[in-house]
Amino acid sequence: PRATLLSEYRPFSHLIDAVELDFRLAPNATRVRSRIAFRPNPAGEGGPLRLDGEGLTLISARIDGKDVAPRILPGGLVCEVPDGPFTWEAEVEIDPASNTALEGLYMSNGMYCTQCEAEGFRKITYYPDRPDVMAPFTVRIESDLPVLLSNGNPASREGGVAEWHDPHPKPAYLFALVAGDLVAHEDAFTTMEGREVALAVWVRPGDEGKCAYAMDALIRSMRWDETEYGRPYDLDVFNIVAVDDFNMGAMENKGLNIFNSRYVLASPETATDGDYGRIEAIVAHEYFHNWTGNRITCRDWFQLCLKEGLTVFRDQQFTGDMRSPAVKRIEDAHLLRGRQFREDNGPLAHPVRPESYVEINNFYTATVYEKGAELIGMLRRLVGPDAYRRALDLYFERHDGEACTIEDWLAVFEDATGRDLAQFKRWYSQAGTPRLAVETARDGNALAVTFRQSTPPTPGQPEKRPVVLPVALGAIGPDGTELMPTRVIEVTEAEQTERFDLPEGAVLSILRDFSAPVILTREQSAQDRALLLAHDTDPFNKWEAGRTLAKDALVAMITDDRAPDTAYLDALAPVLGDETLDPAFRALVLAIPSDDDLAQTLASAGTTPDPQRIDRARHALIGALAKHLEEQLSGLYDAMRIDGPYSPDAGDAGRRSLRNAALLLLSHRDEGARADAQFEAADNMTDELAALTTLLRIDRADESVARFHDRWRDDRLVIDKWFSVQVMHAPGPKAADVAARLTEHPAFDWKNPNRFRAVMGALGANHAGFHAEGGTAYDLLADWLVRLDPVNPQTTARMTTLFETWPRYDADRQALMRAALERIGNAPGLSRDTSEMVSRMLG
Ligand code: HT7
Ligand code: ZN
């Protein structure tokens, strides 16, 4: 299939003044009538009307009331039209019950729902399905089902017919419709402008008791967007619907957000602290899109980071404000380095604003989202918070109701601050993770710090130019006092030297707060790292110092068969015992780098990672840590216990995370005795699942696995966890067998994306298991992806990325992974989605 290119963007031939849609719902034969008022676009190039359409049966088409016979093409239709304004009317038939791809109008548990981003609206009716065509929509829905929802405000409801009107012009990807037997958890919100908004979270009957937290997160998000960005809500209703079959996390349809039910439903017994955190973040993210995405949208899909990078940045700020900014920053940087660096350093590397795609759904990536958010964070750091807010005010004022580009976004910052952002713009077009090497030279008290930046080649981009790097740094004295508070250096050259007045013994703390998404390399002694771990005033670098010590210890164990480094073990103890530190932070310090993290570290240092050696070293370090710190861990396990009812707040969640991190280590000393007791006594899913996971990790979980299933067999979201943990924590050589056995379980509904991901995603996440000798896990995954592709191409394509790291490994594994990818690539009738991913990965 032909690629779409950014350079080929042309405005659409027509503008739309109004859209009316009329749905008569039936599972296999839904009728959709459209009535669209078109007029020529003065910026367009004229010509016939070209509308997108896929899988539609055209019943009739009329222009200004007269029948027409458009030419039907593979991806749409073409029709000659009058020179001036005209009204297009069409009727099509579609089959939502057979729509397993979950894109367009589909059915999930007897409920109708839609997913139109990025190009799903064309599966509902003929339309210019592109984000720069914006229009107000009126929607009429006819059905026997009790709840009938669409975007905007309710206009009327009579018998089996509901009408909705959305006054805000929007692109088709924000269209939504829901019809089902649903119940609501309701509340209300008064905006800063005095608008009364009726809020509802709609779920299947029986789930209404699990909506309170999502509602609470929504209300806090609405208030936060007013206070932090001055953005009020703009309709009389805001509805959220939870659906079990969903390809992604959630969707920001105007006034009618649709969510994967796992990001809505929560109760203490069934959801973990992690689930609560994700619900809060995703509810906020979708709500924040109302301004950054919906009111101001993207001109074309190449500009996806315009809405996604900015909205991720906003949801990160929100979570930081609601919880701990330090813990949030560490988690975000950790996620970026795990997922986005992996993408940026492999065959799928692409710029934050790509310039070509075959299937746009394949570009909802960590690079567009998470690296896109880092770019916003760097801009804010460079201009400062006040100028950032001024620029955002100007952005909303200048572009409200428009479909914009990255050029529009950067122009707002240039106009608000007077800065030239030409070099900064390279971040949007250049793929790959910059390396920042730092060297120091001393002359008396003058410390010269030389920064050298370079970005390795990525597919299609052999040469790279220097980017703008805001490098936050400070210094700590040998006695632990702060000698230089944080300042931000702008590194813009390939090589740049900065001088500081710092006495002998001062230890630099570089890239504080992870101020730029780069790989920092620098020689630093274990003593200096231990000093930063003990005394750095910047929480990110304090954590980073411990992390680097752990990685250095592990790398020495993996490559040189060394014993665990006691310097690292000794350095941890004072931090863990420091009661002035947030338990959530201490839990992060205690976490051992994952196998995948170590594989990435080794590969980027030019060493081929051996999954078995990595796994063994990690286990050995865990054992050593448990032995060395046993008493302290035991004390922490008892001290972090919470007596009283469960609360998902950050304080209690932090205590549980530290306690459960201690539990895991202690299980290597007590043969799982504490975990067994905790599994029986737990009154919340966080503790119950942590106990089960711990038992799985020491291979003593058979009984608890069975009991967990019996306890939760009727709760689909908990059963997803049951599937997932067994595979994720299976001993390496057994993982593929465990996964294969679970695919035969009667509850393995592989057409449900959550369930499929629970097993296959977990197999990919079990590093030693996925890469176990012989390639059985690769084959199992490939078999299932070939099977899933005709049913759900989007989820299949996304899951092929589990193979993206193939170039890291030894020749045997490379051959096995490539063979698995080739087998997927050769499957007859493979979707465009999956075939694009496979061919990009194979190069
Ligand atoms: N903007 C939404 C993206 C999304 C999506 C994209 C492709 C296919 C299915 C999808 N479901 C949701 C979600 C977000 O970023 O807020
Ligand atoms: Zn988003």
Image: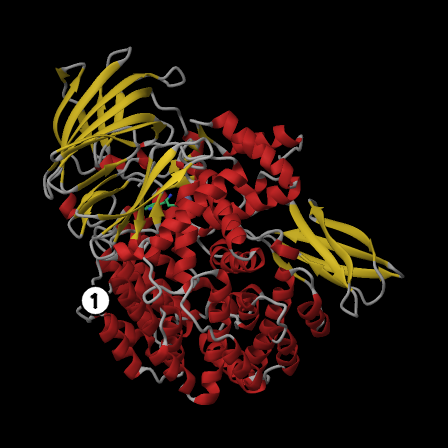
Q: Position of residue 291 (x, y in %)?
A: 44, 35
Q: Nearer the viewer, residue 269 or 1?
A: 269
* Extreme residue toward the front, this view: 644
**Residue drawn at point x = 48 percent, y = 35 percent:** 231
The amino acid type, in three-letter code, at marker 1 is: Asp
Q: Say if 478 sits above or below 200 in the image.
A: below
Query: Horizontal placement of 823 versus 34: left or right?
Result: right
Query: Horizontal placement of 231 versus 746: left or right?
Result: right
Q: Position of residue 367 (x, y in %)?
A: 47, 49
Q: Say if 817 sits above or below 399 in the image.
A: below
Q: Is residue 459 visible?
A: no
Q: Quadrant of ligand 1?
A: top left
Q: Nearer the viewer, residue 617 or 749?
A: 749
Q: Position of residue 765 (x, y in %)?
A: 39, 67
Query: Horizontal placement of 12 versus 624: left or right?
Result: left
* Extreme residue toward the bottom, this view: 670
Residue labelled with disc 1: 714
